Structures are given as structure tokens and as C-alpha cells.
């Protein structure tokens, strides 16, 4: 039995062919599911009764559920309960160009980045494609609006759940599905080199973001254990290759950590590294978490870092923060509900640590 929200249209076509039906039925089902939003085969009036019965045997419409919502200004955070009792989160952000959602790709995360809260809970399991699709469907239903872009930057490392994440991307990108344009989908990775190689051959027009966070390998190894498996140099090489093969500009994410990676020399080092590459750097104000050894870099320091990169000809932006001091999501999401509501609320939204 498969979840209907976890199947690509081409795979559904295969299915119909395998039961001696016409493959255009897959498009009809997609239209019912994603455009008319029905959640039973009985409602699909252009599909005959016997076929509906067969479909019922092979597919279900099981949904994850919204356990809690928290709203602050332009940001809304959703806690989802999965069928097996696990939890993941997604964050909805309102931009001037539309709505974007940050979705989770795994329950927990094994990457163990030193500064990130999401990695405190080791990976429990991969998310299924349908569980990622449903994060979007449930939020769209909740707000009664269409979401125009998706970032895979919530809990988990998407390239550590490669097949299911690719499947998810193709489902939401389908013009008969949720219709999120590939250029409106961003996948963020800590740098699993072989998977980046694989990704460059998918012929997807999605955006790739690399969590670099350090201008040299020594510092990166201290912050991100993945750097010991695939070091900084290999990562930069594969990013160059990715740009060449896909002809797409890549985003370099750089969290600004006070007195760790935020000084002028490091900015110069980063600029030298990236010179000539078709990338843009996104400086991310650090959201303080329970990792008390890390502090947010000062505004002035961030501005200086920004100016240095800019002067050296690097495209750079500072990540917009949502709702004053709450940039809600990045690195603060957790996949286990361990705090009571008030503590959670203060912690996530007011930046106060329990
Ligand atoms: N595993 C993926 C996606 C999840 S993290 C990745 O590593 O890219 C999404 C982004 O948030 C990454 O760039 C991550 O490094 C960053 N991040 C993690 N903790 C953060 C924090 N406390 N404040 C700001 N950004 C953080």
C-alpha cells in the first residue's frame, strides 16, 4: 500500500500501464489530488467504480497532522506529528514576492554541526516523500493560500535522504501537482560530495545552497564533522563542477559566529576562495541556541565582513530575518517535543533559553 502523496506522476503512469489501464489516468488522479484536493478515490467521478476499488487497495491518503502552530509577524512555525509519533517542523515565511516554506527532510540529523540545534537528536529515520509533500499541503490548506517557493532547510540533511528527497522535488515540481517551479526550490546541504555529483546530473533547475560556514578546512572541521569525510577542498571542487555542468549559480551559506569565523582576515580568505566562481554568499545571522559556546556576531562585524566581500567583487547578501529577533527556524528546529509549550514558545520566539 502506497501513500498517494508520495508517488510521481510517471510512476503512477507505470502503475496504470501495469494494470492494463491508460496512462493518462495518472494525470486525472493528479488533478483530483492536487488541484481539486479530494482525499478519496470515490470522489474521482471520471474514474470508474472498479478502478476506484483497485486504487483503494493499492493507495491510501494518510496524512501527517499539525500538532501546533506558532505565529510571529511574517513567520509561522508548524509542528507536525507523524503517524509513528515522531515530530518534525516547517516554517512559513512571508516575503514581498510571495510565501515560502522551509521543510524538514529527516527526523533528527546525523551531521552533528557544532552550532546547530537540530542535530542534537541523532537521525531517527528518513522522512518519506509523502511526509515532505504533506508539510506543504497542510500549510497551504491552513492558510488558504498558495506557497510559491520551497527551501529544504529544515531538520535533516536532504542529501542524506537522497532518493526520497528527489522524489519529493519531482512531485511538487509537477505542473499537474503542487506546481512549485524548480527555480523556486532550494536544497541546502552541509556538503555530501558524492551526492552533489549525483545531483548535478539530475537535470533539475533547482537552486543549490552549500552550508560552508568557514573560509578554511581547519575551522570547518571544528564546526562541521562532515568536513572530515569530505573536506573543504573537495567540496569547493565539486561546487565548481556543479556550476559548470548545471550552469546554475550556487548559494554559499555562511553563519556569522562571534569571534569564530567573523573577522576581516577570514572575510579576505573567503573572498579569495570564491573569486571567479558563479556563487553568491548569504551571510546568516546566527540564531543563538543551547550551544552556549556560540554567539551571534555583532551587527557591525557582519557589515564589515559584508563590505570586505563586496569590495573584493563577491556577490553577497545578508539573510533577511523574520519577525524582529526571531529568525525562527535555522538551526533551532528540533524534531523531538521535549519542552512544555511555554518554554518552547519563549525559546523559539523570544530567543530565551530554558
Ligand atoms: N542540513 C542542511 C539543511 C539544514 S540547516 C544544511 O546543512 O545545509 C539549514 C541552514 O541553517 C544551514 O546553512 C545551517 O548551517 C544553518 N543553521 C544551523 N544552525 C543555525 C543557527 N543556529 N542559526 C542560523 N543558521 C543555522
Image (tube, grey):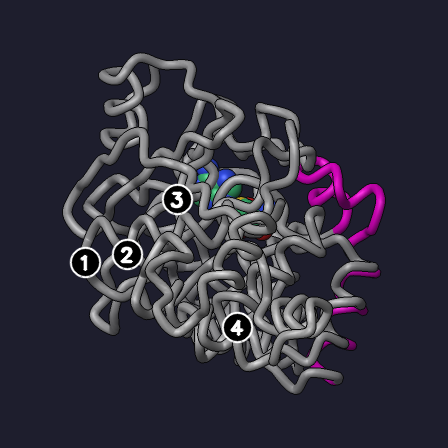
Q: Are marks 3 and 1 in contact (CB under 8 Å)?
A: no
Q: Crowding at label 3, few (<14), some or many (≥20) Cα neighbours within 10 Å?
A: many
Q: Residue at x 42, y 38 (%)?
A: 64
Judge whether residue 45 is colored magenta.
Answer: no
- Would you identify the image quadrant in which residue 107 lies? top right
* Magenta span: 217-244
Residue 144 tag number: 1
Judge whether residue 239 is colored magenta.
Answer: yes
Residue 140 tag number: 2
In this rendering, would 39 be left or right of 12? left
Q: Are marks 1 and 2 in contact (CB under 8 Å)?
A: yes
Q: What element carries label 4?
A: strand
Q: Report the front residue among 277 and 135.
A: 135
| Separation (CA) of disc 3 from disc 1 | 17 Å
Q: Earlier in the sequence, mark 1 or mark 4?
A: 1
| Separation (CA) of disc 1 from disc 4 | 34 Å
Residue 280 tag number: 4
Q: Which of marks 2 and 3 is nearer the N terminus?
A: 3
Residue 90 tag number: 3
Q: What element carries label 2?
A: helix
Q: What element carries label 1?
A: loop
Amino acid at each position: 500500500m502506497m501513500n498517494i502523496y508520495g508517488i510521481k506522476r510517471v510512476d503512477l503512469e507505470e502503475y496504470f500501464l501495469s494494470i492494463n489501464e491508460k496512462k493518462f489516468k495518472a494525470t486525472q488522479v493528479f488533478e483530483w489530488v492536487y488541484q481539486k484536493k479530494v482525499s478519496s478515490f470515490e470522489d474521482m467521478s471520471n474514474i470508474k467504480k472498479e478502478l476506484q476499488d483497485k486504487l483503494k487497495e493499492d493507495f491510501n491518503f494518510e496524512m501527517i497532522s499539525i500538532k501546533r502552530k506558532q505565529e510571529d509577524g511574517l513567520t509561522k512555525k508548524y509542528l507536525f506529528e507523524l503517524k509513528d509519533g515522531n515530530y518534525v517542523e516547517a516554517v512559513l515565511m512571508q516575503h514581498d514576492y510571495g510565501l515560502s516554506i522551509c521543510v524538514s527532510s529527516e527526523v533528527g540529523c546525523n551531521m552533528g554541526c557544532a552550532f546547530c540545534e537540530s542535530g542534537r537528536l541523532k537521525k531517527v529515520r528518513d522522512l518519506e516523500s509523502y511526509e515532505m509533500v504533506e508539510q506543504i499541503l497542510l500549510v497551504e490548506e491552513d492558510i488558504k493560500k498558495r506557497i510559491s517557493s520551497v527551501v529544504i532547510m529544515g531538520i535533516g540533511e536532504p542529501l542524506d535522504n537522497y532518493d526520497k528527497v528527489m522524489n519529493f522535488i519531482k512531485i511538487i515540481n509537477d505542473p499537474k501537482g503542487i506546481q512549485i517551479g524548480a527555480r523556486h526550490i532550494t536544497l541546502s546541504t552541509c556538503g555530501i560530495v558524492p551526492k552533489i555529483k549525483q545531483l548535478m546530473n539530475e537535470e533539475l533547475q533547482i537552486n543549490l545552497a552549500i552550508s560552508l560556514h568557514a573560509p578554511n578546512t581547519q575551522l570547518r572541521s571544528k564546526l562541521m564533522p562532515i568536513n572530515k569525510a569530505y573536506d573543504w577542498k573537495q567540496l569547493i571542487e565539486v561546487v565548481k563542477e556543479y556550476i559548470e555542468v548545471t550552469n546554475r549559480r550556487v548559494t554559499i551559506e555562511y553563519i556569522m559566529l562571534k569571534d569564530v569565523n567573523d573577522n576581516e582576515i577570514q572575510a579576505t580568505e573567503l573572498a579569495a576562495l570564491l573569486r571567479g566562481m558563479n556563487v553568491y554568499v548569504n551571510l546568516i545571522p546566527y540564531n543563538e541556541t543551547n550551544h552556549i559556546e556560540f554567539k551571534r556576531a555583532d551587527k557591525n562585524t557582519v557589515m564589515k565582513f559584508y563590505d570586505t566581500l563586496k569590495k573584493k567583487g563577491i556577490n553577497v547578501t545578508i539573510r533577511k530575518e523574520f519577525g524582529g529577533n526571531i529568525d525562527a527556524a535555522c538551526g533551532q528546529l528540533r524534531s523531538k517535543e521535549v519542552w512544555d509549550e511555554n518554554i518552547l514558545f519563549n525559546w523559539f520566539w523570544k530567543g530565551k533559553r530554558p
